[in-house]
Image (cartoon, rainbow, N blue to C red):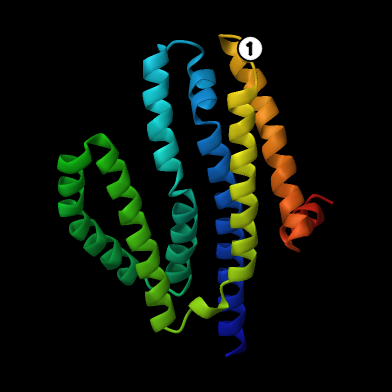
Amino acid sequence: QEKLWEFNTAVNGAVSRLIAFALMMTAWMVALALPIVSFLKGGAYSGGAVTATGHYFALFAVSLALWSAQGIYARAFYAARNTIVPALSGTLVTLASIPVYGLLFHRIGIDGLVIASNLGMLAHTVALAILLHRFRLVSIASLEFGEIGRAAIAAAAGYLATSAVVHALPRPAGFKGDLLVLLAGSLVWAGVCYAFLVVCGSKLPGQVLRRRS
């Protein structure tokens, strides 16, 4: 019983921290989607292509927290020597997602495919969490919802501040201009997220500093 509780605590702690960090990273990626894409392509794309690619990049980034959580939940099953349940769950979610892909694609085009992908990952993550709870391996109630909520607030504030910088900062065309916006936006994002985490009483800054020391 003691080992099971330690397993539950370890998994939920890891999932909670990953979701928290992923929410803030999502805010960074969405706010800086256009300069990130433009910087990585080194000016090889036209303005329209950069805008379109940045749009899809931002849409895919929304599910980053889900990808992070489902990876830990799947490994929790593997650690318990149960590989059948996560594989079966993933297969069923994939089959159920096929008509959703078709419906959303016909309704809203390529955006619909991205949204369907995000919905499929949401369904898979929730299914794994519920199954772990039902198998009494990892309790959903033990997730650090307060920490996740504080990270969500910090992420929202970081996104708003970084978006404001992207729109307000004069940007020279080309590689150097993209680099300038990325550096300025990243500094603002990091500072705002850190400040909100501290004000909200989050444990994340302290955990990061302890690991670096």
Q: Position of residue 169 (x, y in %)?
A: 65, 21
Estimate how packed mark 1 is, as few (under 14), some (14 to 19) or many (20 or more) residues with alpha carbons within 10 Å.
few
- The residue under the point 44% across, 53% down is 67
Extreme right residue here?
213
Extreme bottom residue here?
1
- Find disc 1 in the rendering and name its residue: 176
- The residue under the point 48% across, 17% down is 41
Question: Image height check: is 33 above or below 128?
Answer: above
Question: Image height check: is 155 above or below 29?
Answer: below
Q: Position of residue 71 (x, y in %)?
A: 46, 58
Q: Position of residue 145 (x, y in %)?
A: 58, 70
Q: Do we see residue 75 in this rendering?
A: yes
- The residue under the point 42% across, 34% down is 57
Q: Quadrant of the N terminus?
A: bottom right
Left/right placement of residue 81 relative to residue 212 reads left
Q: Position of residue 173 (x, y in %)?
A: 56, 9
- Amino acid carrying label 1: it is Lys
Depth order, front residue of 161/36? 161
Depth order, front residue of 135/59? 59
Left/right placement of residue 110 relative to residue 121 reads left
Q: Do we see residue 83 in this rendering?
A: no
